[in-house]
Image (cartoon, rainbow, N blue to C red):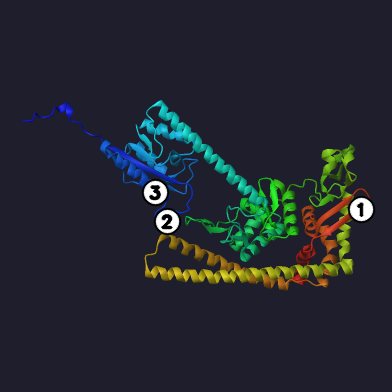
Amino acid sequence: MNKPKNRSQVTSVQSLRCAIYTRKSTEDGLEQEFNSLDAQRESGEAYIKSQAHEGWECLPQDYDDGGFTGGNMDRPALRRLIADIEAGQVDCVVVYKVDRLSRSLLDFSKLLEVFERHKVAFVSVTQQFNTTNSMGRLMLNVLLSFAQFEREIISERTRDKIAAARRKGKWSGGMPLLGYDVDPKGSKLVVNQSEATQVRTIFELYLEHQSMIETVKELDKRGWKNKRWVTKKGKVRGGLAFSKTSIFKLLTNVTYVGQLRYKDEVNKGEHEAIVTQDLWQGVQSQLQKNGRAGGVATRNQFGALLKGIIRCVPCDCAMIPSHSTRKGAKRYRYYVCNTAQKRGWHNCPSKSIPAPDIERFVVEKIRSVGKDACFVKEIVEKSRTQAQVQIEQFNAELNGLDRDLVKWNNEIRRLVLQSQLEDFKSPAVDRLAELQDRLGHGQRRATELREQTMIMQQRLIEESDVTAAMDAFDPVWDSMTLREQIRIVHLLVEKVDYDGTNGKVSITFHQNGIKKLAQEICPETAA
């Protein structure tokens, strides 16, 4: 008879629970039936199977990060893996290559700390090393150094490629812009005519209101939203209400004048501009003038009628109100060239001008407008032209809005029909609610546009209306408060240019200013 085996000769193999982690930096090819993540997992499963005699077992959970960079640890599958390790459910982590887990030495050292703290082994299928000894850890750090170096080289090449493309005027990706669509055949911006009309109107509204807050209020009133798009992952982005920040970014984006910006460089783009240079420059000048105030009226302590609109011609800069006090506490007001004040009076030929003199001159010129028949005729013609342009813009927006309303109604009918044939899923419900909201805003805006068009047509002024308004200017002006006088001057006058070299003053009137004044002073004739 054979003797029974000694108890010390009977050994048991301890089970080793193995988790396979896979990663791919881009989403390209992930839609295929057998993709890179499947290939990595298959290699890991084959390796674990070859170690079955050591008690290795493959866990059924998938830890797959498709479309995530190895440069950081912000990956959903990696977070799940770390959580399972900390919960004591994993004994070994298996990857195809070290750089699949991380391409950052700092991040990898943090992961190794987690592995060592929970006594979890780490295995790379294609790179043989053992992390339990110093030589294995050295080899691992060498491999990681090369992985990080490769990632940084790829990043540099990508940045260089983007810079070269931008310098040639090519669109190199980024968040979609209101007013443009990306050509599906290539990386090129194509004008979206309906959105382009909105963009131009936003620029014009800012010039009209000279305030970002007022512009935002007007856009909310119209129900306009910023660009809405769907990512490759099917997530909806954008479609939000405008804010001061988003309006500022839109108004300062050089893409709208046919250019592209890369860091501090601005180059001519391949795409078509949707905002004219004159409109762009007008908005940039107004933004610079408003500064941090954002268009909010600033304090005018000493009642300077021309504050913000008077400029020094030789220095091409603003003239700012100033004053001095002499004996008897009498205050003398001036407009001083900004350059002269900041860099010395010898740098400016204009230097300063007494405020009462220049203000009196401007007011007298305003009073004489109604007596100049040729000038009145020119104003009326410009006013009518501007009104006609506004009416055409209203009609263009209304036509685009009518098309959108038809499109939204058709999509609502399709979604309702879909709900009757199959289960109505949450995304469809959300989309239906959004469409109903857009439909309501669109219908209200269409009604408002029709009303504004009728008002514009009714308020086309005649030469007699302007003459009557300006004839009434004298008695009305004398009865106004100082604040009202400042408002009227800024309503009528766009800028006052003072050239101290020859003592000349030129006044530029707002094209629509006298029309607005006629409506305020003589509403019965302007209506």
Question: Which residue is tagged 1?
Answer: 504
Locate residue 424, reporting x and y percent. 39, 64
- Given residues 226 and 10, the one toward you in this image is 10
Cβ–Cβ under 8 Å for marks 1 and 3: no
- Give the mark nearest the N terminus, 2 or 1: 2
Cβ–Cβ under 8 Å for marks 2 and 3: no
Distance from label 2 to label 1 (Cα)?
A: 75 Å
- Outermost residue to the right: 502
Q: Is residue 282 visible?
A: yes
Question: Which residue is tagged 3?
Answer: 39
Instruction: Please name the residue shown 94% across and 50% down the image.
Output: 502
In which quadrant is the C terminus drawn? bottom right
Distance from label 1 to label 3 (Cα)?
A: 81 Å
Q: Is residue 295 visible?
A: no
Locate residue 395, reporting x and y percent. 66, 71
Element carrying mark 3: helix
- Amino acid type of the residue tagged 2 in the rendering: Gln
Instruction: Please name the residue shown 41% across and 42% down the image.
Output: 78
Question: Which residue is tagged 2?
Answer: 32
Distance from label 2 to label 3 (Cα)?
A: 12 Å
Foreground: disc 2 or disc 1: 2
- The image shows residue 459, relative to residue 331, as above or below, that is below
Q: Residues within 10 Å of mark 1 (few under 14, many from 20)?
A: few
